[in-house]
Image (cartoon, grey):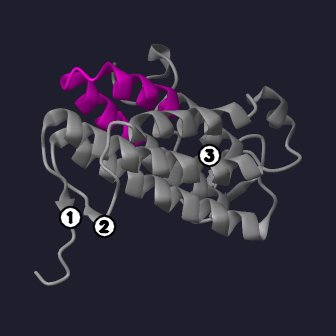
Amino acid sequence: RRRGDSSAGVKIYTRSGDSGETGLFGGPRVPKDDPRVEAYGAVDEANAALGEARHRAEAARDADVAGLVAAAQDRLFTVGGELATPAGARARSALPALQPSWIEDLARAIDRWDGELEPLRQFVLPGGCALACALHVARTACRHAERRAVTLARAEPIDPLVIQYLNRLSDFLFVAARVANRRAGVPEICWDPQR
């Protein structure tokens, strides 16, 4: 379809953001560097990084990691919707609710995978096989999203499950990266402070 051709479906561009503002879901227009936009934008970045990790897991034929990352992508999209919708907006009724069970699911995966791993005795540097590298990138993107959510929570109320989920997801991604290296037979790269 031609760019901007409305007969082909929803337009990708509207020009409404050309002045540096965007509309919140069911809410007012705000600057694109508003803390709420920063928070859901960082969640979107984390979700994109998870997409790369999912692709790498599928390529490595690791259905275990791929399935859990796929679930995390769906749940992160819900987290982003939560952050994109201001308190009191009528649009909130259209959003699925965040679930405490999502955090428990991640904790269960971490506990299960810990059984495959040697105890951690040193700091581990990001690296190893392609899947582990992608998971580490996703982990750091997730930590960035967590920091942006904490900043937003200081300014206005957000669902506390947002920060809890992002925190546990980051933990999960760290352990998933270690598991990916273990399954690929790639040694972990440990920090050498004398190097």
Residue at disc 3, secondary structure? helix
Question: Which amino acid does the dot numbered 3 rest on?
Answer: Tyr
Question: Which amino acid does the dot numbered 1 rest on?
Answer: Cys
Measure how far apart labels 2 and 3 are at the Cα level.
Answer: 24 Å
Name the N-terminal-most of marks 2 and 3: 2
Question: Which amino acid does the dot numbered 2 rest on?
Answer: Phe
Can the viewer see residue 16? no
**Marks 1 and 2: in contact by CB < 8 Å?**
yes
Residue indicated by mark 2: 123
Task: Verify whether residue 44 appears in magenta.
Answer: no
Residue indicated by mark 1: 190
Q: How many neighbours does mark 1 have within 10 angstroms: few (below 14), some (14-19), or many (20 or more)?
A: some
Q: Position of residue 99 (x, y in %)?
A: 72, 33
Can the viewer see residue 29? yes
Q: Position of residue 90 (x, y in %)?
A: 87, 36
Q: Residue at x 44, y 47 (%)?
A: 46
Measure how far apart labels 1 and 3 are at the Cα level.
Answer: 27 Å
Q: Residue at x 45, y 33 (%)?
A: 112
> Magenta segment range?
48-73
**Nearest the eye: 116 or 180:** 116
- Look at discs 1 and 3 and give the one toward the viewer: 1
Task: Verify whether residue 70 appears in magenta.
Answer: yes
Which quadrant is home to the C terminus?
bottom left
**Nearest the eye: 64 or 69:** 64
Measure how far apart labels 2 and 1 are at the Cα level.
Answer: 6 Å
